[in-house]
Image: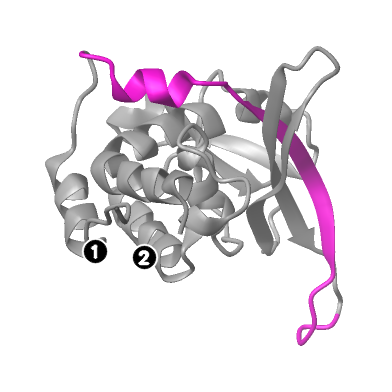
Amino acid sequence: TSAKDIAVYNTVRENFDLALSFAKKHLGYYISDEKAMECLETYYASQGWLYPHSTVNNIPFILFYLQPAINPYGLWIKKDSELERAIMKVRDLSLNPVENRASKYYSKLLPNSNRYTSLTMMLWNHQFKKNSDGILQESINVEICKDVSTNPEMHEWKTLLDKKIMIPELEFVKFIHSDKVHRNKALRDYAYHLMPPVEEDA
């Protein structure tokens, strides 16, 4: 295990709550604490810090990139986000009000149909490269598909949305060191419990 891998691992362990906050802001959809804990379990079990392009800066995105596809039916989408704007252009999807105090921040994702529609969503296509000027351009895509199969025993997925989300360089590192961030003790304790500390060999 390299020094870089250990740095990523320990940063996840010590800043899991901040990674969740940063991911929700930039991915454009709500992730509950319970779902985040499940994602951390998957990340830990699959040793996500060893993913070849994993860095301290892209932790909030790789945490959820390494997860299996989810059913986004009823998923809360952040208002005024890039994802919301992309969804509003898709005829097969609709955004409905959230019926509680969070309604001013989020809308609920639903199929634009009276019939039940099976949806799936995942993060994919992680791009990690420098342009001709040597500037890092890193991105990840949010993909939403619907099942168009007429056979109930098989799936045939049609892509409805494939939105590229740019990963801001060094912004998560700056966020970690900000004095104004709010910490979530329950998430921090969970990461400490799940992930034992790792130190670089002398």
Image quadrant where one finds the N terminus: bottom left
Label 1: few (<14), some (14–19) or many (≥20) C-alpha neighbours in 10 Å = few
In the rendered view, does 131 fall on the left or right side of 110? right
Callout 1 touching callout 2 (CB < 8 Å): yes
Residue 152 inside the magenta-drawn segment? yes
| Mark carried by residue 41 | 2
Span of residues in magenta = 151-179
Label 2: few (<14), some (14–19) or many (≥20) C-alpha neighbours in 10 Å = some
Q: Secondary structure at mark 1?
A: helix
| Mark carried by residue 116 | none
Amino acid type, label 2: Glu
Position of residue 42 relative to residue 139, above or below, is below
At horizontal 55% and vertical 34% (from top left) the residue drawn is 27
* Coordinates of residue 198 in the picture (x, y in percent): 27, 56
Q: Secondary structure at mark 2?
A: helix
| Mark carried by residue 194 | 1
- Residue nearer the viewer, 45 or 152: 45
Can you tell which quarter of the image residue 142 is in? top right
Disc 1 to disc 2, C-alpha distance:
8 Å
At horizontal 52% and vertical 28% (from top left) the residue drawn is 26
Can you tell which quarter of the image residue 95 is in? top right
* Coordinates of residue 180 in the picture (x, y in percent): 22, 14
Name which of mark 1 and mark 2 comes first in the sequence: 2
- Residue nearer the viewer, 200 or 168: 200
- Residue nearer the viewer, 93 or 37: 37
- Residue nearer the viewer, 4 or 104: 4
In the rendered view, does 139 fall on the left or right side of 150? left
In the rendered view, does 104 fall on the left or right side of 115? left
Position of residue 18 relative to residue 65, above or below, is above
Q: Residue furthest bottom?
A: 153
